[in-house]
Image (spheres, rainbow, N blue to C red):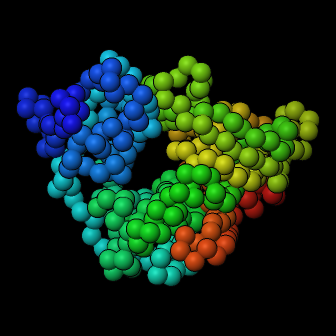
Amino acid sequence: MTRDDAPLTPDNDAPATGGDVYSFMIEPDHAGARLDKWLSERIDVLTRTRLKALIEGGALTKNGAVFSDPSWKLREGENYRLTVPPTADPAPKGEDIALDVVYEDDDLIVINKPVGMVVHPAAGNWTGTLVNALIHHCQGSLSGIGGVARPGIVHRIDKDTSGLVVVAKNDTAHQGLSTAFSVHDIERVYEAIAVGAPRPGIGTIDAALARALNDRKKMAVVDERTHFNPRRAVTHYKVTETFGRSRAKLKGDALASLIECRLETGRTHQIRVHLASISHPLIGDQLYGRGPGLAGLKPGEDVADRAINAIRKFRRQALHAKVLGFVHPITGEPMRFEREAPADFQDLLAALRAL
């Protein structure tokens, strides 16, 4: 190993963060190397999987800005700073929380996640998560690849999105499922209730996503040609039902629609951002929506009042992960699961169907 290839060591003068901080600049000899691989070869105490999770979780900055693409090809002169959280992060404990188990064997478990449950522990949600429930349910038989805070977690859905999630119970299953997700060999179908109805009623939204520059909690559609870290995102949609055409301000328009969304990729908030980007945000979406009301819906009669009240009460994104299909990573058996949306989603549909 040459001097330029020497292991990276934590900064001696880094501020006290409870963890280690690594600062480094890319030399000419390292340009073109993949970021996570290059780091894994120089930080002995961290695996490539752990480094990838840290990078994707926002622990790395490039030239002073958060950078979350582990596959980035290094360029000469880039300055990086990696902050590794302390190894003594609170380890999640098993909690006796009821789970809607759709399928389970020795290798994996499929859960119908309820609204309001966070998938894995994080700041502000150290208990009551799906991981806490799984640790209790599975009695230690979860894959360790996701780290102490995310054992078995292969993918996730938002706290206020309901529906199907598959979790790995051993590392071999985890690796197989992760590969299937990375090459988009997973069937994922969501139901969404949106404001208005897209035209045409069947289409594809192919628009890259990245963290919004003015709000790190939000994702945004970005230009792949100019943005420094775009992630390709593709959603195939089909309008399956429309509501309130007779009450719309413009003849023939719908006040709302039920949309089937098939994910080709699975980016953070993908469906929510994609539909909002074409002016059809999800009903109840507090982050990307336009509030709880629908333009053109006037109170004053029972049917309209029922719809207005249902919409106002629906204070989460109207999104449900309905179908999950994949090839079993161990047996090779095709598997497909389907679950209907929960009661609040069905109540909203009933009120809209009455318009």
Most extreme residue toward the left is 12
Most extreme residue toward the right is 251
Count of labels shown? 0
Q: Please name whichever residue, 5 or 21, is drawn nearer the observer in this view of the structure.
A: 5
Q: Please name whichever residue, 129 or 314, is drawn nearer the observer in this view of the structure.
A: 129
Q: Is residue 353 above or below residue 152?
A: above
Res 20 visible:
yes
Quadrant, the N terminus:
top left
Residue at the image position 66 percent from the left and 50 percent from the top = 263
Taking the image as shown, residue 150 lies to the left or right of residue 86, namely right
Q: Which image quadrant for residue 102?
A: bottom right
Q: Please name whichever residue, 110 or 224, is drawn nearer the observer in this view of the structure.
A: 224
Q: Is residue 234 above or below residue 324?
A: above
Q: Is residue 257 above or below residue 116?
A: above
Residue 296 percent coordinates (x, y) = 78, 37
Residue at the image position 65 percent from the left and 66 percent from the top = 325
Q: Is residue 213 above or below residue 38?
A: above
Residue 266 percent coordinates (x, y) = 58, 48
Residue at the image position 92 percent from the left and 35 percent from the top = 251
Q: Which image quadrant for residue 343?
A: bottom right
Residue 73 percent coordinates (x, y) = 43, 30
Taking the image as shown, residue 268 lies to the left or right of residue 326, namely left
Res 308 visible:
no
Taking the image as shown, residue 344 lies to the left or right of residue 97, namely right
Residue 217 percent coordinates (x, y) = 44, 37
